[in-house]
Image (cartoon, rainbow, N blue to C red):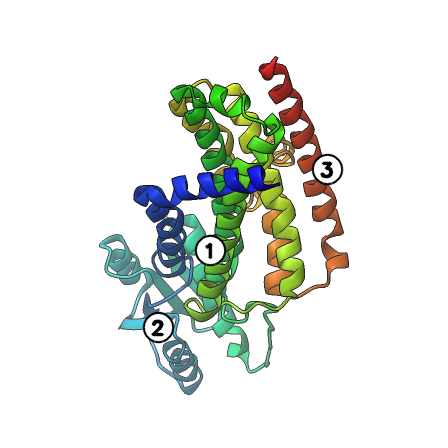
Amino acid sequence: MKQFISFVIKESRHILRDKRTMLILFGMPVVLMLIFGFAITTDVRNVRTIVVTSQMNPQIQAAVERLAASEYFTITTTVPTPKDAELLIRNQKADLAIVFSKDHAIQFIVDGADPNMAQQWTNYATGVMMNMQGTLVNSKMLYNPQMRSAYNFVPAIMGMLLMLVCAMMTSISIVREKERGTMEVLLVSPIRPLMIIIAKAVPYLVLAFAILITILLMARFVLDVPLQGSLVWIFVVSTIYILLALSLGLLISNIATSQLMALLISAMVLLMPIVMLSGMLFPIESMPTILQWLSAIVPPRYYIEAMRKLMIMGVGIQEVTREITVLTGMTLFLLAVSLKKFKTRLE
């Protein structure tokens, strides 16, 4: 046990001495949280809006005031015809025009260059104008009443960072030993080879939890994202996911023969699928069928789904048993394959 602890301390010191690695490990979560929380956002704010009407009766005036009072729209001008509004939109002087006709019908003219934002603008405007005809219609947004994109991005960033840090850094660390020829020295030491690998993974396990805590603290106190569910279950599911990532890193280290190859494999196998197929940015239900099938083998998909349920929805552990079962199965499979490959390579 003393030898094992010595190897853990040795690896920890090696990581702590590398200031650039530490800056990446702890700087990347902070930067990504700030970027996704404040810069890269799908929230609707200050949509430049034109009101198209030939007359301003009390009903239309009340609707315009409701629109202007919301934080989503900024009334820039009023024009008499839809052609005038379309010309202003084409000249990039407005984003949305609301046309009030004499028969009390409402039409939206929207800048559709970005179809996703155009759809959101239309949905928001429709919600504000719901009671135009004097019939009160109330809508209630569960879990995210302010419709803030940070609620969606925080679990996604957790899934991406934990996978990249654990898998990529672990694989590069082991391959570095092989490149330098020090792995052979370690393997002839009294400690068993498997314990050496575990000792190298332990510091990254601790770092992963430190990153997880950093993200949760920033989510709660910087981005004001509530943690509705149990922290215990959040850490339990995260532990399974971190072990999965470490197993994947071990597998990559068995395949790669250089640090560059390990980095490239990690980028191809991890980064692109996480961003494109995990549901981080794009809804899986909207993808073509073949991509939905491919997303079923992407581990972050299940972790992100579980975190959204536990953190945002505040459900119990029974509601994420499917995700936990899949992640546990993947962890056991990757760990078995990694250890088998590792023993084969030792021979």
Q: Is residue 187 left or right of residue 42?
A: right
Q: CA distance from mark 3 to mark 2?
A: 61 Å
Query: Residue 285: in sight, yes or no?
Result: no
Q: Is residue 106 left or right of residue 347?
A: left
Instruction: From the image, tell me which residue sits under label 1.
Output: 119
Residue under the image location 72 percent in, 37 percent down: 329
Residue under the image location 64 percent in, 60 percent down: 310
Badge 1 or badge 3: first in the primary sequence: 1
Amino acid marked by disc 1: Gln
Does residue 147 sit above or below 292 in this rendering?
below
Indicate the position of residue 211 as horizontal and vertical percent values: 47, 53
Residue 317: assigned label: none
Residue under the image location 59 percent in, 26 percent down: 193
Badge 3 or badge 2: first in the primary sequence: 2
Instruction: From the image, tell me which residue sits under label 3.
Output: 329
Instruction: From the image, tell me which residue sits under label 2.
Output: 53
Indicate the position of residue 177 as horizontal and vertical percent values: 44, 25
Q: In the figure, residue 20 lies in which quadrant?
A: top left
The one of 318 and 185 positioned closer to us in this rendering = 185
